[in-house]
Every structure is written in structure tokens, then in C-alpha cells.
Amino acid sequence: MNDSGTQNPQRAIVQIRPGVVHTALGTIGGWRGTVLRSFTAGGIEYTDIEVSPKTIGGLSKEDRERFYTHKLVFTRVRVAARDTETLPVPFIQVERADIATLSQHEWFQEAGIHQQDPTKAEAESIAGPRVDIGRREAIRSLVGVGAILMITLALMQRDCSNGNRGYGSWGRSGGFSS
Amino acid sequence: MKRYGLFNDTRVTPSDASFFAIQAAVSTYPGDPLRAQLDEIVAGISSNTDQGAQSALAAKGAGLLSRALPFIEYCVWDYTLVPSVALKEFASWVDDLQKTADAPPDAGDVTRFLTDDTSYFAATLVVLSCHPALASWLEYYPEHLAEEQYFERKTIDTILKRFANITPGPLNQCTNAMFTTMPLAPDDFYSGKQLRSSDWDYLRPVY
């Protein structure tokens, strides 16, 4: 690739031409979406599309299951601009946000719920399977006793301030004093 | 050798620290100005020793990622308030990222720009702090999210915006941090197939 891409944010609604097959997603001909950006690479213009709520809603259960279990992001797709045609349809922001959240929750029910919480995985590999339980119990006790939280934070602030003063770097950042 | 995108390689770590990390795979293309800006930020952090300047650069990076939210397609974030685990997790993330940066390019790990699928780069922010700016935010925000909300786009946006806020922000008061972009060469990319492979199985899709 010798030429650089060019970003071109738009709000156009496009439809992918019939018969277009995506490497990972399969047949995407007929899908509609909002153009997030266009760019040129290798002399070809590409379009990044956010797939429309109507198209997502019309996907079969089997397709959605396949996308979720294989971790395929189907709500955005990149295609050559020549494989799309612009439609005279208005852009609706609210529907886009809603369908993204619904898809995220649907993914969680289909696949995410069966996977290890990634916020726990690394900690558990380092410190054992009970470390996260300890973390959450510690939080609950702090939240339950507000006074303890305030005292703890005050102590942390004092400890940080004192403990790092010797290294000099905190002086530049400022922001608190003991 | 100065570590890639790390604030400080020798700073003594505190005994009472919190930890947060976020990694986002962003769709991209040759000559993507976002990728160039982020690479510049990483280079600035790597060549600078002033923590205030490094914090400002990393916060700028978080802000740029927040503005590129529609193009984040895979993500993971992680945190802990348990000090002993925080130190280990920070070291683990930093060592893994540095190991990747040091490794000779492997044709199987990266790809040229894909003409039939989306190409990606990965940006990572790792923060270690003993300051309440991080700990209190962790207690206030991620600890109270339901699991199905973890990778909602608005959750990721909230996280990135928090770290983009330099005054007063968790980066400004952090003990150590790392901000990186991968692959190292701007002409290399990750494919969706690679990001969905077992090497990256911790990444979650962002719909």
C-alpha cells in the first residue's frame, strides 16, 4: 500500500449490493447501514458501515448465534464502496445506540456468560481463585461503612503523599496535600 | 533499554496500590491519522522522563481513543483494588506488552492491510496508583457494573473519558503507567481472525 487512507465522516445510509459475501460474516448483500467513514487504500475506496437496527433485527437466530459464539462483530462491517449504494433514508441516532446495547446484552446471554470474567482472569492466575471474591468483599464492606471508607481514603492519601514525597515525582503533579 | 510506552522503569512501587488496564482493538487503515497520533504519543512517553508530561500524553491518548469509539470493535479491561495483586497485575501487563514489542516480527502475528476484511491495531493503557483518584473511581464505577454492561460502548466511553481527564485524573496522580499501540510497524495490522484466535481470547466483542 503506497497511498494513505483518507477519513471522510458522513451520515449517509447505504445498502450493500446483492450477492456480496463477507470473508467472516458470510452473505451481507442487502444489509443496510450508516457510513461511519470512507477511505482509500491501494487505489480502492472502502466504507466502514454501522449496520442498521432494521438489518440487525432481521438477522436469523442462527446467524446471530454464530456471530456471538465466534466473537464476530457484525454490527459494523467494512466493504468496498463500489459494493454499496446510497439510500435516501434519514439517520436516527437513538435507534443505533439502542440496538448496540441490545446486541451487547444478547452476546452476553449467548456467549459472554459462559466465559470467565476477563476482569478476574488475570488476577486469579496470579493470586488464586479467591482473589476476586476478596476484592468484592472488601468493596462491599467499604461501601457498607461510609465512615471507614472516608478514613481509609484519608489514610491512603496521607500514605501516598508521605510515601512518594521522597521520589520527587509527585511534586510536579500536585493536586493534593497532607 | 527504555521500555516501550512505560512512564518509569525504576520507580519504587508503593505497598498500597490499585490497578487498572484497558486494551482496545480499533479498526484502521493505511495512513490512519489516529494511529499516527497515538504512535506519536507512545514515542513521547518513551522519550520523556517528566511524569507530568507523560500523564498529559497518556490522557490525550485516552481522549483520542474515546473520540474513536465507533471504531473500537474488541476490548478488555481489568482492575483490582487488592494491593498485592495490583503490583503483580501491573508487572504482568507491562512485561507481556514489552515482550511483544521486543519480539521479532512474526508473519503469523500480524498481517498487511486486508482488502476483504477489517484491519485493526490495539491500544493499551495500564495504570498503577496508590492515589484515591484511581481507587475511589474503581469503587464508584466499575465495581457496580453488571457483567453484561462491561463491554457496552457507553461503558468503554465512560472509562476512556475518565482517563482522558487529566485534572484531576487518575493518570495525573498515578505511580506508574504504560500506553502502547501494537503492532509496532504502522504498515502492519491485526486481522479479525487473529483477534478472535486463542492468543487474544481475553478480548470481548464490542457491538
Image (tube, rainbow, N blue to C red):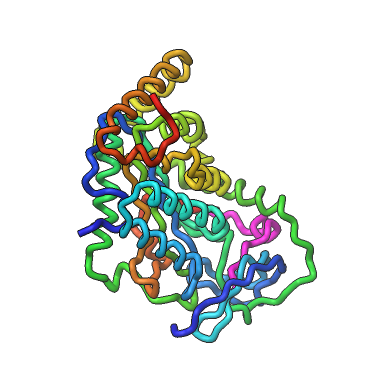
Residue at 75%, 61% (x, y): give it.
A91
Against A66, residue B143 (above or below) is above
- The answer to whether residue A67 is visible is no
Front position in the image: B39 or B205: B39
- The answer to whether residue A75 is visible is yes
Left or right position of A138 against A54:
left
Front position in the image: B135 or A162: A162
Residue at 46%, 75% (x, y): give it.
B30
Which of the 4 image quadrants contains residue A131?
A: top left
Against A1, residue A36 (above or below) is above
Residue at 54%, 43% (x, y): give it.
B158
User: In which quadrant is the N terminus of chain B drawn?
Assistant: bottom left
Residue at 38%, 45% (x, y): give it.
B21
Q: What range of the chain is rendered magenta?
A: A47-66
Which of the 4 image quadrants contains residue A37?
A: bottom right
Estimate the x, y position of residue A54 in percent, counting from the top left. 70, 58
Residue B90 is covered by the magenta coloring = no
Against B150, residue A75 (above or below) is below
Estimate the x, y position of residue B7 in percent, counting from the top left. 31, 50
The count of marks equals 0
Estimate the x, y position of residue A118 in percent, counting from the top left. 38, 43
Residue A65 is covered by the magenta coloring = yes
Against B26, residue B78 (above or below) is above
Left or right position of A159 against A64:
left
Estimate the x, y position of residue B184 in percent, counting from the top left. 33, 67
